[in-house]
Image (tube, rainbow, N blue to C red):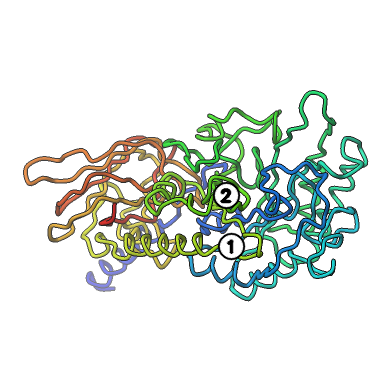
Amino acid sequence: MSNFLKNFAILSLILSAGCGKQDPPAALTPAPTPQQLEWQKLEYYMFMHFGPNTFTNMEWGSGEEKPEVFNPTELDCRQWAATAKAAGMKGIIVTAKHHDGFCLWPSAFSTHTVRESQWKDGKGDVLKELSDACREYDLKFGVYLSPWDRNHPTYGTDDYNLTFANMLKEVLGNYGEVFEQWFDGACGEGPNGKKQVYDWELFNRTVLELQPDAVIFSDVGPGCRWIGNEAARAGETNWSKLNVAGFEPGEKAPKTGILNKGEIDGENWIPGEADVTIRPGWFYSPETDDKVKSVSRLLDIYYSSVGRNVNLLLNVPPDRRGRIHPTDSLRLMEFRRALDEIFAENLAEKADIKATNVRYNSNKFSPRKMLETENYDSYWAADDNVIQATITLDLKAEKTFNRLTLQEYIALGQRIKAFSVEYWDGENWQLIDRQTTVGYKRILCFPTITAQKIRINIEDALACPVLNGVGLYLQKIT
């Protein structure tokens, strides 16, 4: 064999050995299930509080309301779905049964349902109409069932747990795929009221037997958690992890501060969901027609929820006709237009991007992968022993921006503990912001800056950082 062929063979072996080092980072546990990851990608969907309270101006009904009070004159679930779709939402969760016990479907386990109402002469079924409409408009369908029941005669006894489980079976077994089961831990019975010891193990098991891909919401999950307030303000530090041993929904839940921020050492992956209403109350009332939240307020809500690693569940209550009120609908469209304008152009899309460390020096983990937004599974990663790194973006020309998005590839767990962002003013690097967690998505808001270069410093992490998204944007509206 000639020297040339020998050298070529040796070089080929060296190159092939180097190219073989392509292993991705090991997942940092806990990490999301495939269902939780797909749920997180939804980001924004609609909550709909609807029932007798819609017609009585109550937030918590007594359960003594006559079913006849529920009588929407123009109920149109296709209008609900069309509005949600046009607003950019990905699904709808409806209050199938609120605390008053009224069922929006003709349950065989209650006499306080649409069957006893005047609507459609007792032959209607809101859940059927809505689930059909969601499928038509390619929206996810979810249900809220309150375990608290101020009407059912067995509430406060062991028999009620079986009754509630049977109601779950009806709802989860007859209306197609359910993406989220929402459990409210609220109970206002008071010290002299009925005492119901909820069988949460039975409830959760029933959900997953019928809807194995459903994400279960409660104070302690197991699918996703409440973030501790109804203003959609997640903590600036927000881990998608929680310790739940010894806790349960309601009075025995973790403290709201823990729910708001998650726990860095949490043993369970339970990401946050932020619920907030577009009006002052959760149910429609004519007195609040002029009190719908402004676009500016909705943007603040978006940044403090989706922008802090939680999903946004925005309540839009149908009116007494059974339709989304024109004021609410218009505001949703204005909000959608504002988001579209802000995030229409990623000013970093064509940037030159470099990192101080690239896993195995491989193109497979290049920082350029952070800009390949069409592929969620495309990401930059550092070597296993690296927990600090700097990513520099050269925009090739000066750009003006005031919003930055950053995304961790959470399929491998949540890692980043501290990071900062700087811009080059022509002479020095100037600090824009310093924060802690990133998670699925982080949006930083700051005064408008014009610069050609920015850099992102990962200052501390639980394991090698893994990022799959970065963006720079300009919000012109105030």
Residue 180 position, x and y percent, is 66, 55
Image quarter of residue 390: top left
Q: Type of residue at label 2?
A: Pro
Seen in the image, is 468 located left or right of residue 241?
left
Name the residue at the front extreme. Answer: 287
Look at the image and tell me whether residue 14 can be seen: no
The label on residue 301 is none
Q: Please report contact status of discs 2 and 1: CB closer than 8 Å, yes or no.
A: no
Along the line of sight, which residue is nearer the eye, 293 or 260?
293
Query: Mark 2 or mark 1: which is in front?
Result: 1
According to the picture, the residue beneath numbered tag 1 turns out to be 91
How far apart marks 2 and 1 lie (CA) works out to 20 Å
The label on residue 32 is 2
Above/below status of 80 relative to 270? below
- Count of all numbered marks drawn on residues in the image: 2
Residue 23 position, x and y percent, is 45, 55
Residue 194 position, x and y percent, is 85, 31
Above/below status of 296 relative to 252? below
Element under label 1?
strand
Q: Type of residue at label 1?
A: Gly
In primary-sequence order, the first of circles 2 and 1 is: 2
Residue 64 position, x and y percent, is 83, 44
Q: Residue at x 51, y 43 (%)?
A: 28
Count residues near mark 1 (Cα–Cα under 10 Å), then give few for <14, some for 14-19, many for 20+: many
Question: The N terminus is located in which quarter?
Answer: bottom left
